[in-house]
Image (spheres, rainbow, N blue to C red):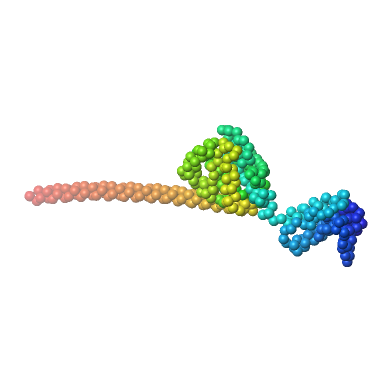
Amino acid sequence: MNDLSRSSGQPDDDRESSAGLHKRGSKRQPLNNSMEHPLQTSRRPQHHLQRKEDQPLLECNERKEEDRNPNLETPEELRPVCQTTNNPPLEGLRSSFRRWTRRIKPTQMSLNFFGKQKLNLVLCGYDGTLKVSVSKLLRGKKVKPSHQRAISEECVKREERIHGRLISLLELPALTWLSEEEVMRQTLNCVSLCDPGVHVFLLIVPAGTLNNDDRAEIEKIQKIFDSRDNFMVLFTTELIIIKLKKVTNFVESSPEFQRLISHCGGQYKVMGLNEPENSRQIPELLDYIENMKTEPFSHQMYVKAQENRVRHELEEQHKKEMENKIKELQGKVQSESAKVEKERQKHEKEIKDMMKKHQDEARKQAEEFHKSTERKLQHVLELTEMLKEHQK
């Protein structure tokens, strides 16, 4: 036990109390409350053990203690007590705090100190400049007007407190410019950086006519994540809030935008990029997202989405292969049918030619026979006349 005390790096009085607690059959001696050390009042004095071989024993005792006390309580190590020791063992306090944080449920960890849920938002879309502008606007930064499009190449994460909420903002690069392997890496990294998951994917779309790049990016994003509930379309415009009603009317009257909104569960907002700092559009957007009450898009949901996507792609590939085979067979059948038809027509022509030839030959023979018969009759008549003259 002396070696054990030396390895723990504790003061001598702490070593003695720790050693006495671990002897078999020994009883714990009560200490004077005025002289109690915070770690000596702990229900888990085994945390004075610092050697690696003692870790399994510590973890086993921690699990037993947690099973006996399932309710979340502040451990005694963290309660304020009277302390007279000049050099408190900080490592013990750190380990106690780590044990306490491990006992907090994930739902409790996702709440910030203001009682509002932490939000993980992913900004996605084709235009990188537009995503940066929306990110700045959400963080209360000044947005500089820019009419030039930019393409980001890496996933960027920013975490700030916005309107009393802890917000995690991730800017997803445009996927249509990346290889398939890089798309998987970036999207997986995006979901992995959000704990417990992505609350909302904000699909940043300019409130105007979509070009082919925007359409291809939207289709790619929807295929990768395969979620309606966790998506929301954010239409952006440089008009001020007074004219946002016109933009909203335009969005609601556009069949293409309505199809896009339908694919995103009917969730959308119109955001002005030139709004004043006291505008209510950011708090209203955050309240709207919180009221969606959707399950965060977790790593498991991402894996399931990829399985569904791969299965769908394989089914589509199999369907295309079958269609190609059917077309190929139909082509062969048509080719064979054409050959058969050609042969049939050839045989018919040969038969017709043969019949015509036979008919011509029969006609010639009939004509020759008729001429021969006429000659014979003429000869007989001549002989008859000669006989008559001879008899006279």
Q: Residue at x 31, y 50 (%)?
A: 355
In the picture as drawn, the residue positioned furthest to the bottom comes out as 25
Viewer can see residue 183: no
At which x and y percent is residue 190? Answer: 65, 46
Residue in front for this viewpoint, 310 or 248: 248
Q: What number of labels is visible?
A: 0
What residue is rendered at 85% in x and 53% in y?
Answer: 83
Q: Quadrant of the N terminus?
A: bottom right
Give the percent coordinates (x, y) of residue 229: 57, 51
Q: Identify the residue at image location x=55%, y=39%.
A: 272
300, 163: nearer the viewer: 163
Residue 298 appears in the picture as rendered: yes
x and y percentages locating residue 64 in the rendered image: 77, 62
The correct choice, above or below, for 80 with respect to 173 in the image is below
**Residue 55, quarter of picture:** bottom right
Front in this rendered view, residue 336 or 306: 306
In the rendering, at what x and y percent does residue 147 appear?
A: 56, 33
**Residue at x 85%, y 55% (from the top left corner):** 37
